[in-house]
């Protein structure tokens, strides 16, 4: 980092993620970005799980106004807070309005702060000037590879220009956009950190090439992070048995990448609503008045409602936009109870893509959301990006993870997860049994 300007050095020395020596400073992540425009095989964004610590997980989504109020409360309680970051739970730049509005409102407080954004980079080129203008100097881009053959094993789809791309084309589009966005950000003087998730057998032999290329384009710090792949997280890699790297594999990858790039080794793989100093996360302890002490667990939900789009009545085999009714199930500790079906107006009328933003389409979406009131989750075989975002903005989590699977088997899995999150008692996968 010898060639850095003194102003850049000062920005690094007070950011706990950029400098290990800055551990006395705290950060807060504001969870205002629900939607994501790509799917990574190691990611399963969740909204109600306060017991996990990993990117993409939050307890509660927030509007920009709620997020700024939370920051102000935290700042009063933790005056060492020096970084305000937006890192999800989706991608900040797939939610540019909320992200920029939140950053602008925080910047207007004129506190001594670093504004920070962590993105997959797909939309970075489109928003890099806005980020710079609002005062973002610290930017993280997750770049796992620069080879589309490798990328096609990590990203099942990428949503770009109103199209869902798959395979090599998807990966190449993402890589091209990431690298162009990185260069643009570095040219604007941003301090760009690159995160690379180390996935044994997929990109572990490739991190040195990533480091070399991102260095050439202006990145200043590289964070090789171990894959988190537990089956209970419900990620594709977790369910497929993809293993995490060993300590020695991580060390070897960092050493290889370190030939070209300064390496970060103190990353905590923060949640998207992390609060406090690195390694001392207080996300679950802040009541609405921001006053409770660190270490208290959030109260689990007593019930959960799941809506299922099904044509056959047996499988999760219907596109969200084609559904005219949803089967609804209530999950409690006592078991799973079928509720009356919800009849809805079909959202997509004829077209196969349902992402146009016409007034009619917006009205149909808003009627549909009212019909699904009280539901926490929607399971379907496919869904467009627009409806996905609208559902998430209204606190409903869409999922296509179980496409074409049997409804009763999926409900058993979801019920088991619900029980694990809501009680310390015995867990059974049998529908109807007390957990
Ligand atoms: S974890 Fe990432 S987004 Fe959060 S403050 Fe650190 S660098 Fe910024």
Image (spheres, rainbow, N blue to C red):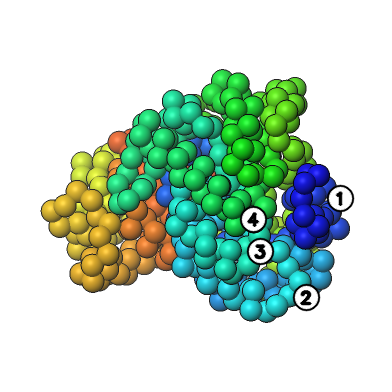
Q: Secondary structure at mark 2?
A: helix
Task: Classify mark 2 as within 8 Å of ligand 1 or not, answering yes or no.
Answer: no
Q: Which residue is mark 3?
A: 115
Q: Image height check: is 159 above or below 76?
A: above
Q: Image height check: is 356 above or below 432?
A: below
Mark 1 or mark 2: which comes first in sequence? 1
* Residue 89 visible somewhere in the drawing: no
Q: Image height check: is 3 above or below 15?
A: above
Mark 1 or mark 3: which comes first in sequence? 1
> Does the residue at mark 1 contact the one at mark 3 (Cβ under 8 Å)?
no
Mark 3 or mark 2: which comes first in sequence? 2
Q: Which labelled disc corresponds to residue 159?
A: none
Q: Residue at point 20% right, 52% down?
A: 322
> In the rendered image, which quarter contains the C terminus?
top right
Q: Residue 203, percent across and down?
A: 56, 26
Q: Which labelled disc corresponds to residue 190?
A: 4
User: Distance from label 3 to label 2 (Cα)?
Assistant: 18 Å
User: Distance from label 1 to label 3 (Cα)?
Assistant: 19 Å
Q: Secondary structure at mark 1?
A: helix
321 displayed left or right of 92: left
Q: Which residue is mark 1?
A: 21
Q: Which residue is mark 2?
A: 76
């Amino acid at each position: 980092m010898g060639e850095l300007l003194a102003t850049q050095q000062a920005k690094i020395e007070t950011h706990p993620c950029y400098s290990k020596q800055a551990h006395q400073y705290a950060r807060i992540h504001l969870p205002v970005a629900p939607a994501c425009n790509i799917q990574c095989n190691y990611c399963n964004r969740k909204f109600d799980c306060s017991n996990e610590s990993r990117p993409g997980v939050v307890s509660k989504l927030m509007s920009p106004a709620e997020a700024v109020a939370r920051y102000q409360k935290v700042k009063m309680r933790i005056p060492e807070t020096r970084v305000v970051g937006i890192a999800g739970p989706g991608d900040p730049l797939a939610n540019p309005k909320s992200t920029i509005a939140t950053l602008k409102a925080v910047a207007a407080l004129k506190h001594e702060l670093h504004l920070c954004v962590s993105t997959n980079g797909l939309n970075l080129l489109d928003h890099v000037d806005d980020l710079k203008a609002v005062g973002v100097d610290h930017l993280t881009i997750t770049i796992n590879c620069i080879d589309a053959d490798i990328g096609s094993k990590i990203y099942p789809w990428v949503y770009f220009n109103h199209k869902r791309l798959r395979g090599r084309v998807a990966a190449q589009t993402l890589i091209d956009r990431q690298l162009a966005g990185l260069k643009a950000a570095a040219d604007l003087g941003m301090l760009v950190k690159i995160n690379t998730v180390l996935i044994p057998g997929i990109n572990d032999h490739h991190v040195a090439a990533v480091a070399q290329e991102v260095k050439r384009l202006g990145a200043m710090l590289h964070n090789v992070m171990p894959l988190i792949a537990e089956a209970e997280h419900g990620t594709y890699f977790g369910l497929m048995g993809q293993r995490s790297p060993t300590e020695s594999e991580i060390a070897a990858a960092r050493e290889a990448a370190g030939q070209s790039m300064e390496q970060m080794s103190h990353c905590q793989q923060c949640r998207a609503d992390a609060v406090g100093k690195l390694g001392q996360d207080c996300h679950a302890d802040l009541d609405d008045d921001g006053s409770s002490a660190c270490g208290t667990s959030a109260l689990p939900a007593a019930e959960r409602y799941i809506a299922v789009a099904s044509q056959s009545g047996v499988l999760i085999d219907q596109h969200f936009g084609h559904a005219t009714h949803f089967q609804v199930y209530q999950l409690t500790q006592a078991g799973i109870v079928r509720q009356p079906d919800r009849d809805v107006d079909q959202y997509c009328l004829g077209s196969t893509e349902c992402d146009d933003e016409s007034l009619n389409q917006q009205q149909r979406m808003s009627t549909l959301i009212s019909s699904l009131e009280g539901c926490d989750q929607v399971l379907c075989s496919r869904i467009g990006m627009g409806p996905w975002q609208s559902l998430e903005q209204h606190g409903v989590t869409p999922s296509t993870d179980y496409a074409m699977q049997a409804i009763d088997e999926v409900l058993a899995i979801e019920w088991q997860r619900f029980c694990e999150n809501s009680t310390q008692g015995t867990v059974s996968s049998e529908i109807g049994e007390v957990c």
